[in-house]
Every structure is written in structure tokens, then in C-alpha cells.
Image: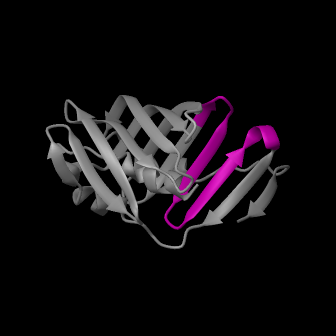
Amino acid sequence: MRYIFLLTLLFTLSFSDVFSMNSFEADFTQTVTNEKGNRLEYKGRVKALKPQYALWKYLQPSIKLIYVNNNQATIIEPELEQVIVKHLKSKLDFFNIIKHAKKIDTNTYVTNFQSVKYTMHLRNSQLKSIEYKDQLDNIILINFTNHSINREIDISEFNPLIPAEYDIIDG
């Protein structure tokens, strides 16, 4: 789960001009492949805003909202009427991590964070995909389409709206 939080702002990348990137929005398809080759696919939309705000809207196969706001992640699962609040151990500067990614060929960059190697692929100076291996040796591939960069996003969009009847679990 912690890799979702790391990737949340990792997706705000635009290698063409990392220093002027302030926001990022895109549709995504996330594929998780285990050691046996079994695959799960998720689809949704991600929004991120500098320095450390993100909202993942998972739409398929089920709805899930993941809000990252500095040192806290809030996961809302409407089908379960449940919210999980996770306090992140450190404030991660994802834009700084991206800034230090190493170019390995024309459209491929690699960066390491907390013992995980992330491979990022670009197309036309926009982030096309990120791939990494999680702690369970699953291969995670996230593809992005319909990018919107530096669109003004109100910071209030990163404040979760929790229905009063939902159970809240502090994780």
C-alpha cells in the first residue's frame, strides 16, 4: 500500500520541465502481475498537486478513493462504507525524487526510493508509464493517458469528504 502513496506524486512527472510542473492529471490503468503470471487490472483517474497532494480515483473493478495530503493517506471504500486513515512515517518530496531520476535512454528514466527501483517511460515528453516491483514481488505497471499538466487545481479537492455513517479505521 505504501507504494501507492509514493507513486501518487511520482505521476506528476514531466521530464521536459520538471521545475515548472505544478499539477498533473491523467487517466490510468494499473496492472498487477504476481509471480505466477496472474494479473489484476484497475482503472481510474489521478490528480496531483505540488508539493505533496494527490487523489487516486479507482473506478474499476470497484470504486476506491485514495487521498494523500502531506503525511496522511485516507482510503475511502464506498462499497464497504469504510475509511482507512494511514499516517505516513515521513513527508516524501516526490518532485525531488523525480528530479534525480537518471536517464538510461531516450524515453526511459530510472530512480530508486526506499529500496525500490522505479522505471519511467515517456512519450512526447509526457509520462507514459511507471513500472516497479512491490514487497510481494508483484510487478506493478501503471499506464497514463489523457494527461493534463499545470491545470489549476483547488487544494480543497485533496480533502476527503467522509460520509458520517462510514466506519473509520485509524491505521
Q: Quadrant of residue 60?
A: top right
Residue sitting at the far right = 165
> In the picture provided, is 70 more to the left or to the right than 131?
right
- The part of the chain drawn in magenta is 58-80
For the C terminus, the image quarter is bottom right
Is 160 in front, or is 27? 27
Give the image location of residue 16, x and y in percent: 17, 42
Residue sitting at the far bottom = 89
Give the image location of residue 140, x and y in percent: 48, 42
> In the picture provided, is 97 more to the left or to the right than 160?
left
Q: Is residue 155 above or below residue 14?
A: below
Instruction: Give the residue drawn at x 52%, y 60%.
Output: 69
As for residue 84 lying within the magenta part, the answer is no
Residue 155: in sight, yes or no? Answer: no
Instruction: Give the residue drawn at x 44%, y 37%.
Output: 142
As for residue 61 lying within the magenta part, the answer is yes
Is 137 in front, or is 83? 137
Instruction: Give the residue drawn at x 53%, y 37%.
Output: 33
> In the picture provided, is 4 more to the left or to the right than 171?
left
Please state the total of marks drawn on the protein image: 0
Magenta span: predominant SS is strand
Is 54 in front, or is 62? 62
Residue sitting at the far front = 36
Q: Quadrant of residue 116?
A: bottom left
Give the image location of residue 125, x and y in percent: 20, 35
Residue 49: in sight, yes or no? Answer: yes
Give the image location of residue 141, x and y in percent: 44, 38
Q: How is the image coloured?
A: one colour
Q: Is residue 15 above or below residue 143?
A: below
